[in-house]
Image: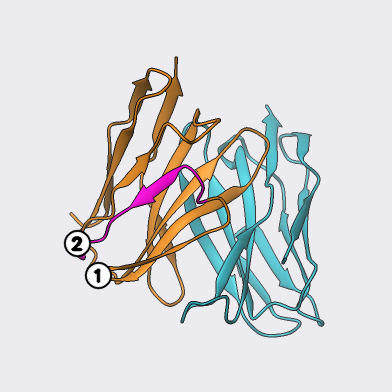
Amino acid sequence: DGGITQSPKYLFRKEGQNVTLSCEQNLNHDAMYWYRQDPGQGLRLIYYSQIVNDFQKGDIAEGYSVSREKKESFPLTVTSAQKNPTAFYLCASRTEETQYFGPGTRLLVL
Amino acid sequence: GQQVMQIPQYQHVQEGEDFTTYCNSSTTLSNIQWYKQRPGGHPVFLIQLVKSGEVKKQKRLTFQFGEAKKNSSLHITATQTTDVGTYFCAGRTRGGGTSYGKLTFGQGTILTVHP
């Protein structure tokens, strides 16, 4: 069964802690993306990667970091430098036409 | 930078009524995509429009791309309760440092359908 998996579905973090969100895809897509979604807003691009061992900052990269050591995996770390980390985080990969999203991780900072 | 504005932000309709959401870009787009996100779910790709003036239909859904490739609309005929969710447009421009171009999402229109 092909697709994108994200874990965990819900994540609670204490203020000041770093946390890593997992994203795995078995669609054999080169390009992968991380978006952040807040209520009443569209999706905002955090980071993207077009190929293994390469990634680029999106529109709101401050306070986040990523790695792309394998084609299948694109983990996102939310660092303590991110001032408002509570949000819904969506990972995506794409073909030339279609972008496929994972189920998302809801991060809540306590 | 590129901006994609989508209106309305909210739309409440009675089941059977029609629904339209509009998307406007500050720059000319190479293509535009539409996504649907069910409550509690993730966005799901609906369609991509590429050509100026293009119109595509999917059952009760009609998608249009403007002649200037700066605006688009999604129209749903005779809404059903299964249509509830948030509808996003996403406009793509070439360049932006990527081979695929930069995809910018609108804020979305939240559709509620009352039975």
Residue type at tag 1: Val
Which chain appears cyan? B
Q: Chain of mark 1?
A: A
* Residue A82, placed above or below residue A32: above
Q: Chain of mark 2?
A: A
Q: Which residue is mark 2?
A: A69
Residue at point 68%, 38% (across, down): B110
Residue at point 77%, 37% (across, down): B11
Residue B35 sits in which quadrant?
A: bottom right
Residue range (magenta)? A61-71
- Asked whether, in this view, residue A25 is left or right of residue B95, the answer is left
Earlier sequence position, callout 2 versus callout 1: 1
Residue type at tag 2: Glu
In the rendered structure, the colour chosen for chain A is orange
Q: Secondary structure at mark 1?
A: loop
Q: Which residue is mark 1?
A: A52
Depth check: B88 or B27 in front?
B27
Quadrant where the N terminus of chain B lies?
A: bottom right
Residue A7 sits in which quadrant?
A: top left
On the image, the x and y values in percent for residue A13 come to 36, 21
